[in-house]
Image (cartoon, rainbow, N blue to C red):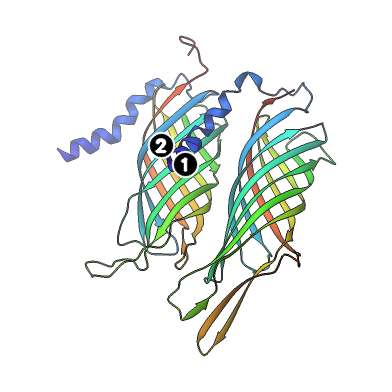
Amino acid sequence: MVKQIVIILFFMPLFLFSQEESRVIDKGLVRFQGTIGMGKLLNLNETNIFLTGNLEYYIQSLISARGDVYYFLKNDENSLKQNHQLFSGASYHIKTNNNFDPYIGFQPGMALTQSFNSPRKGNESVQQFSSSTSYSPLISGVVGFNYYASKWFHLFVDGRIVQGRHLSNFNAVSLNEVRISFGLGFNFNVLKKKGKN
Amino acid sequence: MHKIKLISIVLLFPITVFSQEEMRPSNTTKASGMFELGVRSTISGFGSTNNIGTGFGGQFRLRISKRINTEWFADFITEDIDGLAKRNDYHIGWSVMFYPFATEGKFVPYILAGHCFDYTKVSPVRTNENIIVDEAQSRLSSATQLGIGTHFNATDYFDVSFGVQYMVHLGNDIHTDIDEHNRTKELHIEKESHSNPVLEGHLLFTVSVNFKLGKIW
């Protein structure tokens, strides 16, 4: 049964090639998605998990404006108690002749962060204190691709590198992180008139 | 409530771009009157603490003429002072950008100069080390900046700008000193009195992305 599901999932994109003729990537395209994101802190051996979503608008087929939100799911084994992040910026989409849409982007951002005095390891009982919450500026680059399966849906893989530092009344914690998210997104074009596409 | 507002603004930022769809620039019209909106990251270095700060901010630009543009900005910069204190800087100001060479094309270099107002706060950090610290100090000051940079016009509607500027603040000085006696560190955060305003400068490296939203006139 599991094998069948895996096979169906792997071959599902093939059903979408029938849509190749009309190119979805164009000026006026709006895409949005919500999914789960995973990150690895580069200076600490810790994994972060986020609920993440974004909204993107293509001002041209090559350039888009984009906003992202990451809601941090608390984990006592991490150094951070809170690490919610917002990003805003732009992406450059590499030109292709089909609905495959690779991109790179730059997004400055801000994080709402709070740290523990020490992360909890395994089941050990450690008294944890929390730092004050603080806002931390972030620098971020994104790379990934979208595959527009139809006028309404796309699949995406999004990678991100984040640079920042949580500064509070406790020790500083590096926010440098590599992050990945993927899933299904939704899209529509606000400029194309009905029947024109 | 503030969080919800902030999330809404960031997520709706792209919407501001397509609301201007019919006002888009054309290569055939003159450059003045162009309104741009963007976000930026700033690295602050070579300041009094010799640490590196990281900042997030935004700006809008209003082009006055073919060779003169104006940039109105706000930045929030944080800096880790040797793991013992943190410094927060809030900048708000404006710059005039002069285009001495090309005024259009892929690369458009510029010289900028302007003014800035800022609020600075230095706060101690509680560490595991044996340390004696002073209370947090803050100040308001004004500043002036001079720099160079270039726009990289990826398309007619969008540019990435790289700039470096030296910003010198005039106001009360806040400086930090770290001493160590018998394995106990002492962090001193000192603020000079109003009667002794001093100059304090730092170098700012900025990368910004900007959307040309339309012409105002």
Residue at the extreme left: A1
Relative side of A85 to A108, left or right: left
Question: Label 2 sits on what residue type?
Answer: Phe
Image position of B187 with respect to A185: above or below = below
Q: Residues within 10 Å of mark 2 (few under 14, many from 20)?
A: some
Residue on which the image places disc 2: A156
Residue at the extreme bottom: B182
Disc 1 secondary structure class: strand
- Foreground pick, A193 / A82: A82
Relative side of A18 to B197, left or right: left
Q: Position of residue A137 (x, y in %)?
A: 53, 52
Instruction: Give the number of callouts.
Output: 2
> The C terminus of chain B appears in which quarter of the rendering?
top right
Report if the CB atoms under discs 1 and 2 are less than 8 Å apart: yes
Q: Position of residue B3 (x, y in %)?
A: 44, 43
Q: Position of residue B121 (x, y in %)?
A: 59, 61
Quarter-of-image position of residue A132: bottom left
- Foreground pick, A100 / A70: A70
- Foreground pick, A168 / B141: B141
Question: Label 1 sits on what residue type?
Answer: Gly
Residue on which the image places disc 1: A144
Image position of A109 with respect to A22: above or below = below
- Residue shown at the point (83%, 35%) measured from the top left: B67
- Residue shown at the point (33%, 66%) measured from the top left: A119
Relative side of A117 to B217, left or right: left
Which of marks 2 and 1 precedes in the sequence? 1
The chain to which mark 2 is attached is A
Residue at the extreme right: B100
Quarter-of-image position of residue A59: top right
> The N terminus of chain B appears in which quarter of the rendering?
top left
- Residue shown at the point (56%, 85%) measured from the top left: B180
